[in-house]
Image (cartoon, rainbow, N blue to C red):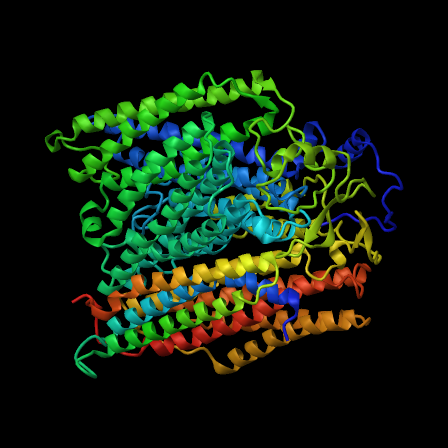
Amino acid sequence: MTTAPHEPRVAPPDAPPSALRLHRELSAIWDTPPGWGRLSAVNHTILGKRFIIAAFVFFVIGGLLAMLIRVQLATSGSAFVGPEIYGQIFTMHGTVMMFLFAIPMFEGFAIYLLPKLLGTRDMAFPRLTAYGFWCYVLGGSILVGAMLAGVAPASGWFMYTPLSSSAYTPGISADVWLLGITFVEISALAAAVEIIVTVLKLRAPGMSLDRMPIMAWYLLIVAFMMLFGFPPLILGSILLELERAADLPFFDPTRGGDPLLWQHLFWLFAHPEVYIIFLPAAGAISTILPTFARHELVGYRIIVVAVIAVAFLSFGLWVHHMFTVGIPHLALAFFSAASGLVAIPTAVQIFAWIATLAQGRLRWDVPMLYLAGFFVIFVIGGLTGVMVAMVPFNLQAHDTHFIVAHLHYVLIGGFVFPMMAATYYWLPHFTGRLADHRLSVPAFWLIFGGFNLTFFLMHLTGLLGMPRRVATYAAEAGWDWLNLLSSVGGFVMTAGFALFAADVLMQIRFGKGFRRNPHQARTLEWAMPTPPTPYAFASLPDITDRADRLEPGGLGNRLARGEGYLGFARNRWLETLGVDMVSGRPEQLIVLPGPTRLPLWSGLATCAFVLCLLFKLYLLSLLPLIAVVWLFLGWTAATAAKADLGLLPVGRGRELPPHWEAERPPSWWAMIFTLAGDGTLFLSLVFGALFLWLVAPGWPPGEVVLPAPVPVAGCVAVSVLAAIAGRKAVTVLRAGGSPALWLGLGALMHAATVALLAALAAAVPGPTTHSLHAVTFTLLFYAGLHAGIGLVYAGYCLWRQGGGYLSRRRSLDLRIAALWHDYTAVSTIVALALAVALPLLAVVPETRP
Amino acid sequence: MIDATSGRKILLLSLAAGFGLWAVAFVALYAMLSIGCAFGWDRGSLVLGLSLQRLQLLLLLGIFLALHVALVVGLSARQQRSDTATDRFLHSAARLAAIAALAASMFTYCGTVLLTTCNP
């Protein structure tokens, strides 16, 4: 995380520098180099903007695809494009909008705003931000490149099997989706871990949880949803790619697989995804609306509870996308009830916003116009959502254009309109310029009118029976005039978005300058120069009240003069503070990494690995894989220190340890949350195995073989020993001894685990013959992969020990590795237990076919 | 013994306790329902005209509702011992979430009492 000179200066300057000198000194440390050096950017302000711009480019691509859809459907019997191209168009429209626009757009806003709202200087892991950005852009480019080459995926954005299986979609188009989207999801998971750790650990001193800006609560909860929501889809994508590439029959009902497993894994991600998209927008509303209501947000605490409720309930609705597939009756009732229930905490937020408006004195401005559009459209989308939550209605409307209308009301109403309001609200912060708003009002009416013309009518075409995803329809159906009007509305809406883009460009180019805080907001992001400096705050504030009740003007001046924490430059370190996650009490000095091209090289190597898999160059893929591991290890080459520093002054009379000498630094927490996401993927695999046993046809397989007991017992023993060795290494180091022996033992035990698991996997009878064997093989592979990474960790720790980077105070590397060793042992034991239990369960006779 | 810092981190986790319990109940009831349907537990009657399927689901539901109530009571008691504004906020939010989760469980799983469990 840090670059630490061997003999750092620990004391701050004797006299505080002037505001201008402090600005120059901090800028010299935090600035990104010009020219090609821009590729080394890791700063959150730069990367946030890049995410937003890239997401907008993908939005334009997705929008153009939507126009093609509307041209095709404008009249019956259209010959504009054939069914194959139409399949590619609607698949890419959905895929681009969901994965390449909505999530990255919110990530961009979060990355840009979050440190500023929290009163800190950057995200917790700037290089991870940059790596996530490159994964996103490169993964998105693979998808768009495939589309331009005519091999875009064409099985729908949900990629249902068996349509997406190799039997019905030969070639690489489905692989493009599976590998490209998984590549992009690295970015989402990286953002999730980073947002969680940043909110919990990198707040301004004094900012206890109850003083956090409401947006931080929204982003924290959404990041947890991403951490637990994305792994099921990543697992599903891996399993489907394994089926397509290696013929492992997870979804093939003729060999004990089940296409419904894909639907479960997909929707287990994709329904929470709707709320992952909506909640950050709701956070923006909760931040913007009080400013224009000139009244603090009503019901801060109840909104926090409501967002928690939405987060959990959204994970209990996924089957409402599958009501027609034959789920047990009572389960339909559970999912239907949860689907209706989620409207209540959503409505709590809406009523809190209305109450805020009612309590305040509304100042009407362009962001409020767009929020008014949000209220109308989202409420309609919410009401149709309650309709489709009801099983009988859902059965009638399933897979019709009514659903298309509903999801666009929810997603465009719940995300696009608030984000346009957010754009107008925060654009002065990005640019330092104010809009004259000449184009924003006609743009709104074109978008609002065009949207309702397009999608309200789809409710009617849907109720008249028009199915989704059909390239043409017969004139006798009588849907022509509704579809024609929908298409006209689509083009009106597009004209509105073009006007919106023109307005934003005009503001960036010709907007008028302003001094500070043009909206008279009361949150921290306005307590800094605009456009922001790369270090965000010249010194860090001491927060004594809720962070939406501040006076940014006066506070900003004091911080610029260096009157807060860390109001000085030292050792060319990029410094900020880490706090206790509940009270906000400062507890460590965090030194962040500066600009580096390592994230770019790592992203390119990852891209090369993905491309090798895409073109089935499996042996060659080992080269970029080794490069990825080598580059990731390269991230650590310049980190931490070779000497203990002890307590360092951080200003205002306080002294704190550097993070690498602290007990619970951000990287330790990052490992905890990474393992939580990893564990979710593993639990999804366990769910998949049990689902296939219970539901899939063709069980038991002809040949049922129990794994040999001796290797299983040996494997459990060595994986537990590896974990014990990892813990002992920490204990010995902290007692002043050398951990080398224990680290070596840990490495040996991990190697033994890998060998034993490989032997067990080799003994699995024909993984391609039945899903039982495929699942067993995959469980063993998962455990083996973790033991292999554990081996790398142990070797890395040995290298750190040999290089003199470890001491009693500097044991962080070992403590992080110990977490991995512990998780590996637990997951290996569970994987082996399931590998033994599944063959036993398989032969238990079921009484119902 | 839990030190003050660990105790406050548990306090943070308690925000998710109520709906976490709702989620565990969801998984447990859905899993046991599916197992019962696969093994034909819904056929015939075991006690008082109730099938094995209905009995095991009602038992599970009863356990989870009891846990919900215990959580609400426990958090209410802890809320009265809060000594800082942050603790009071977290305790209060956790208690509200737990009450909402209890209501959510009663609503989501009430079909267990009467509805047909499996497809014919």
Residue sitting at the far left: A476
Where residue B71 appears, x then y in whole percent? 45, 69
**Residue drawn 35% across and 40% down?**
A410
Q: Quadrant of the C terminus of chain A?
A: bottom left
Residue A430 visible (yes or no): yes
In depth, the one of A811 and A348 nearer the eye is: A348
**In the rendered image, which quarter is residue A255 located in?**
bottom left
Where residue A783 appears, x then y in whole percent? 53, 67
How many marks the image carries: the answer is 0
**Residue drawn 71% across and 60% down?**
A796
In depth, the one of A530 and A789 nearer the eye is: A530
Where residue A813 appears, x then y in whole percent? 71, 61
> Is residue A681 shown above or below A625?
below
Locate residue A358 relative to residue A668 in the image: left or right.
Answer: left
Locate residue A336 relative to residue A348 in the image: left or right.
Answer: left
**Residue drawn 26% across and 69% down?**
B112
Locate residue B42 relative to residue A786 in the image: left or right.
Answer: left
> Is residue A51 shown above or below A344?
above
**In the rendered image, which quarter is residue A123 located in?**
top right
**In the rendered image, which quarter is residue A845 located in?**
bottom left
> Is residue A659 shown above or below A532?
below
In depth, the one of A76 and A15 nearer the eye is: A15
Residue A620 visible (yes or no): no
Where residue B67 appears, x then y in whole percent? 41, 72
In depth, the one of A438 and B90 nearer the eye is: B90
